[in-house]
Amino acid sequence: MKKTLIALAVMGAAAGVAHAQSNVTIYGVVDTGLVKETGSDVRMGGNVDSRIGFRGVEDLGSGMKATFELERRFNLNDGTQTNSGVIDTQDPESTNLETLDRANWNYNDFISGKKADWIGASNVGLKGDAWGQVRLGRVNNLSVETFRMLDPFNQYGVGASLAKANLLRSEQLSNTVRYDSPLWSGFGFGATYTLGQNTKGGTLMSNYYDQLGNDGWAVNLKYDNGPILLLANYDRAADSNDSYTWNVGGAYSYAGFKVSLGYQDSRLKLFEAVDGTLKEKDWIVGLQYKTGAHTIGASYNRGKVEVAGTNFDGSTNKYALGYTYDMSKRTSVYANVAYTDNDEEIAGYYNLNGSNRDSVTGVQVGITHKF
């Protein structure tokens, strides 16, 4: 009799633990394959960022919920973090931009001088059905999160749009408050506010933050209803001397086809006193067709960069084609090819593999599993 009571008590405690964790979701992506690009040897690398994440929701009653998310991204082939590096705050001049991983570039992380352990989102917040959601901590950048929807390759792999090479690009933002409105017949808006690093200290980097540092903020407008997607963003980066990016675009879907068009314009003002403002303009035209387990994507990108008063001035054209086959709801295999043609004056700026070449051809094959 005592053994039975003990067993029932243990079962009840286990059920209580399971119930307490019932609103926590563990999710992730594992992806890797082979990549060959002009100017670099065959390497193993992914298309979609591999990650593991934890997402939770607690019902507080009266239509309000508490939320949290923790997400860590990594390179599946060797277990390292997908981090492009940070500026050396003790000796900023020693930082070599040419050696940084542009494929995983994050301006917000770089300029902070702090390496992130949770490279994806890491935040806590509140959500209400009537008023929307507020999150605090490390959040996804509204501009990147929405503008990438116009790219058939979602700004991943060798086919990624030229917008991924933007030096102001930050997929995630630390020290940020983000608000997302409810959706009204497909229409919604969002806003973020990012704290700068100004500390009123006496070090070289503290002096930089005090002079050129600023808080960052962004606004997003989006309409996503049925076959039509429209979006617009304005994003002023923190600690950037008021540098900014804005973009607009839209997409139309019909009978398995999706056609997209987008334009992005940015001004990097950090080097105004030395070289002038770096201006970057990027266009994208995308086409995607999905039928059953088969998805074909293609895109044309054109980019132009310019620094007034210097020889750093030119344009780039990029063409990409990809195929994905869904073996199941969670597992897919893919093959992508892309060709990038740069003007000699800006050779290497848009080449995410780091090669300083006028033209680059990239081929990529691999497998993705989501859980």
Image: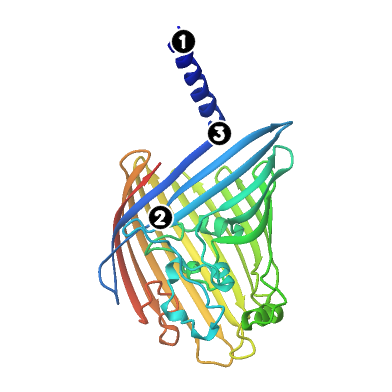
Residue at the front extreme of this rendering: 2
Determine whether the residue tagged by mark 3 lies in a helix, strand or loop.
Answer: loop
Amino acid at dot 1: Lys
- Marking on residue 97: none
How many C-alpha atoms fall within 10 Å of the one at disc 1: few (<14), some, or many (≥20)? few
Instruction: Say left or right for 33 vs 180.
Output: left
Alpha-carbon distance for marks 3 and 1? Answer: 33 Å
The label nearer to you, 3 versus 1, is 1
The label nearer to you, 2 versus 1, is 1
**Residue matched to label 1:** 2
**Residue matched to label 2:** 48
Instruction: Indicate which disc, 3 or 1, sits on the residue closer to the N terminus.
Output: 1
- Marking on residue 23: 3
Alpha-carbon distance for marks 3 and 2? Answer: 26 Å
Q: What residue sits 48% from the left and 47% below the top?
A: 53
Q: In x, y percent, where is residue 52?
A: 44, 48
Decide which of 15, 226 is in the foreground and name it: 15
Instruction: Indicate which disc, 3 or 2, sits on the residue closer to the N terminus.
Output: 3
Amino acid at dot 2: Val
